[in-house]
Image (cartoon, rainbow, N blue to C red):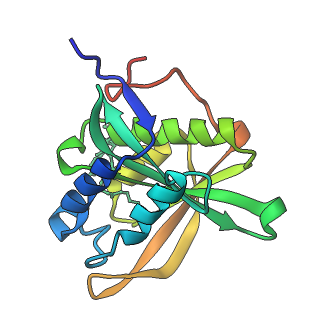
């Protein structure tokens, strides 16, 4: 029997095809993430040249029991000079059929663990819509703290939306055992 173990792994061209299919519509992207049709040629170029890793914008595929479940990203953010004040902002997009099973929490926890293990940053941040209750719950379960409201930050769906800014610091992160969607080790 195949395990339900959640893993992060480098993205493939076939994954990008699956993401295009899943996220290029409002129902697939969800109203919190639908910005209209978005070209993905730059992602494909970044995959060819650097595997979508080791850059200012990076991506790993999320798999559960070896099946593609979605993707996580981490993007460079600077609060001062790059060499001293860089942090990562994380983002996630699960395929519609993978939502609501605890994968979002486990995948973002794994990504934070990965970033604190393999990079020297002191903080990992995330932003989300105040109405995106599932994402807010995921972040809070991992230990992210609310830092504030970025007012009218995002134009989407014909109007401005506030964004919540969350962060977790290196010494606040409880890595816990490697996780699976149902929370078991
Ligand atoms: C947001 C997203 C990552 C959440 O991941 P998920 O696997 O669906 O969420 P989970 O199953 O881990 O659930 C997380 C928590 O949110 C809760 N939750 C889910 N929907 C909720 C809602 N509408 N209201 C309140 N709580 C909700 C769940 O009950 C769970 O809490 P619990 O463990 O205390 O019961 C995922 O749904 C997704 O990819 N959505 C589309 C893209 C997106 O919104 N990305 C984030 C952008 S910032």
Q: Which residue sits at x=37%, y=40%?
A: 62
Q: In the drawing, does residue 16 fall left or right of residue 73?
A: left
Residue 46: x and y, percent?
48, 61
- Outermost residue on the top side: it is 1
Residue 144: x and y, percent?
56, 47
Residue 6: x and y, percent?
37, 29
- Outermost residue on the bottom side: it is 158
Q: Residue 4 appears in which quarter of the rendering?
A: top left
Q: Which residue sits at x=73%, y=37%?
A: 171
The N terminus lies in quadrant: top left
Q: Which residue sits at x=25%, y=36%?
A: 101
**Residue 101 can be seen, yes or no:** yes
Q: Residue 3 appears in which quarter of the rendering?
A: top left
Residue 178: x and y, percent?
49, 23
The C terminus lies in quadrant: top left
Count all numbered tags in the image, as a single digit. Answer: 0
Q: Is residue 113 above or below residue 140?
A: above
Q: In the drawing, does residue 98 fall left or right of residue 182?
A: left
Q: In this view, does 160 lie above or below 139?
A: below
**Residue 94 can be seen, yes or no:** no
Q: In this view, does 23 lie above or below 68?
A: below
Q: In the drawing, does residue 178 fall left or right of residue 80?
A: left
Q: Residue 102 appears in which quarter of the rendering?
A: top left
Q: Which residue sits at x=42%, y=53%?
A: 136
């Amino acid at each position: 029997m195949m395990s339900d173990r959640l893993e992060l792994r480098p993205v493939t061209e076939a994954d990008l095809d699956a993401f295009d299919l899943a996220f290029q519509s409002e129902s697939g992207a969800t109203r919190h993430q639908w910005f209209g049709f978005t070209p993905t040629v730059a992602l494909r170029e970044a995959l060819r040249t650097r595997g979508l890793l080791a850059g200012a914008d990076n991506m790993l595929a999320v798999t559960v029991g070896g099946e593609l479940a979605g993707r996580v990203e981490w993007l460079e953010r600077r609060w001062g000079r790059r060499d001293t004040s860089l942090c990562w902002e994380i983002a996630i997009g699960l395929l519609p059929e993978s939502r609501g099973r605890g994968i979002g929490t486990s995948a973002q926890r794994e990504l934070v663990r990965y970033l604190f293990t393999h990079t020297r940053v002191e903080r990992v941040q995330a932003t989300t819509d105040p109405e995106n209750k599932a994402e807010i719950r995921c972040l809070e379960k991992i230990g992210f703290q609310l830092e504030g409201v970025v007012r009218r930050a995002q134009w989407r769906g014909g109007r401005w939306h506030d964004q919540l800014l969350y962060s977790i610091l290196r010494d606040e992160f409880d890595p816990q055992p490697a996780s699976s969607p149902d929370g078991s080790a």
